[in-house]
Amino acid sequence: MPRIRHGIGMLAALLVTGCGSGIGAASSAPSPRASAPVSVVPSSSLPSSPAPPSSSADQPSGSRAERTLAEMSLRDKVAQLFTIVVWGQKAGAASKENQARYGVATPAQVVEKFRPGGVILFDWAGNVSGASQVAALTTGLREAAARSGEAPLMIGVDQENGLVSRLKSIVTTFPGASEIGKTGRTANARDVARATGEELLDLGISLDFAPVADVNINPRNPVIGPRAYGSDPGKVAAMVGAAVDGFHAAGVASVAKHFPGHGDTSVDSHTGLPVITHSKTQWRKLDAPPFREAITHGVDAIMSAHVVMPKLDPSGDPSTLSHRILTGLLREELGFDGVISTDALDMAGVRKKYGDAEVAVRAVLAGADILLMPPNLPKAYDAVLDAVKSGRISERRIDESVLRILRLKEKRGVFGPIRTDPGALKSAAHRKVADRVFAAVR
């Protein structure tokens, strides 16, 4: 997703979440870790207050996810679709960036006010300075969510290792995907993913926007390059499947990206709208195998790409907004029934054709469940809510997405309790894994 303040060369300078959007540094003032509940002035743009708890006799049957969905208002269900950025190192520390974007100062206040489904952490948002700090931040954010609604907060990060490493030096330094691919051993992809996932859990992070499932076909690709396991679809597929297994062994949710494939581009979707001319036959042969393999291994979520593939969808819309691609190919042809996340909605590739409000609506209509990093959360939230009220999006369609998100949270233990252990990072066992894989790079 868009831009970073500092980087190593053009590629690093443009990378953000699966991408991710870099917009300014956090300005924060110290405050206690455990802040008191915050009183927020009601707004028409906000989800409604949670309903009083029902008696046990009134509780609906079914899974925890189904029971939670049954208790949610429409406003809360729409809010659950959004995964957002908050600025600052502490849940209770004020930031001018939060005030400007959300109308409240602290990360905890943002979560209490908007009750989003998730938060994604970034170093450029001031979220990462040390292991204990990150663990305290994630704990404070979850506590804020618990004070304000029925659904727990999913906290994620874009920790691919290698070039895209949001947690910097506070975690073990593992090789990136291209280096792992050069070893030729899928066990290395699995072991690195498992160790990475274990360290994320120690920090209170339950979802990683990894692995990259793109096949780096184009050597001039300005955005994927070494983030991919390689240029051979079969070998990349095997590595991706192993990485998914590793994340799941650790108990962390994994996200394969960027569907339907970002490997054959010469334009960066952070700054422009790439066009890939693969036919459907070429796509099935070159781009689809790693995503098929990820699905076979039970990947939790798949992230869309802001790329146009005119031979898959002649509308000219990027894949993130394409029903033919997200629903037709991913849901129907590949049989994926997990969570579909957009790539960051503040990236130029998805904003060229429609306004920020319309983008959020069209992403839901295309089949997306998680709306990641909208540049204007109140505007995007109101647009989706209004689309449901007008009948353009059915409430049943919203329920489908929210249930997928809640089932993912239930499966990965997000309903809690979640205990952090920042002192367990950089263990001898994890350093041994890193040393072994680095030594095996050919």
Image: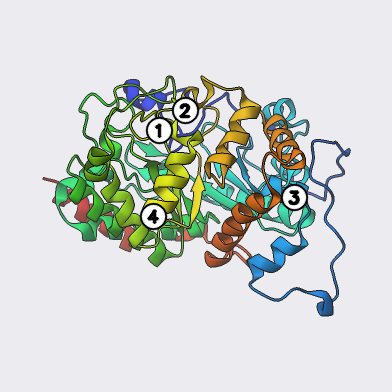
Which is nearer the eye, 120 or 281? 281
Q: Which numbered mark, 1 or 3, is in the foreground of this view?
A: 1
CA separation in Å, label 1 and label 3: 33 Å
Q: Amino acid at mark 1?
A: Asp
The label number, if any, that marks residue 76 in the structure image? 3
* Mark 2 crowdedness (10 Å alpha carbons): few <14, some 14-19, many ≥20: many
Q: Amino acid at mark 2?
A: Asp
Q: How many numbered marks does the figure carry?
A: 4
Q: Position of residue 143 (x, y in %)?
A: 71, 56
* Mark 4 crowdedness (10 Å alpha carbons): few <14, some 14-19, many ≥20: many
The label number, if any, that marks residue 317 in the structure image? 2
Give left or right: position of 196 versus 156. left
Q: Position of residue 98 (x, y in %)?
A: 70, 31
Quadrant of image for the C terminus: top left
CA separation in Å, label 2 and label 3: 29 Å
**Residue under circle 4?**
196
CA separation in Å, label 3 and label 4: 32 Å
Disc 4 element: helix
CA separation in Å, label 1 and label 4: 36 Å
* Mark 3 crowdedness (10 Å alpha carbons): few <14, some 14-19, many ≥20: many
Task: Determine contact: label 1, label 2, CB under 8 Å.
Answer: yes
**Residue under circle 1?**
313
Which of disc 4 and disc 1 is earlier in sequence?
Answer: 4
Residue 166 in view (yes/no): no
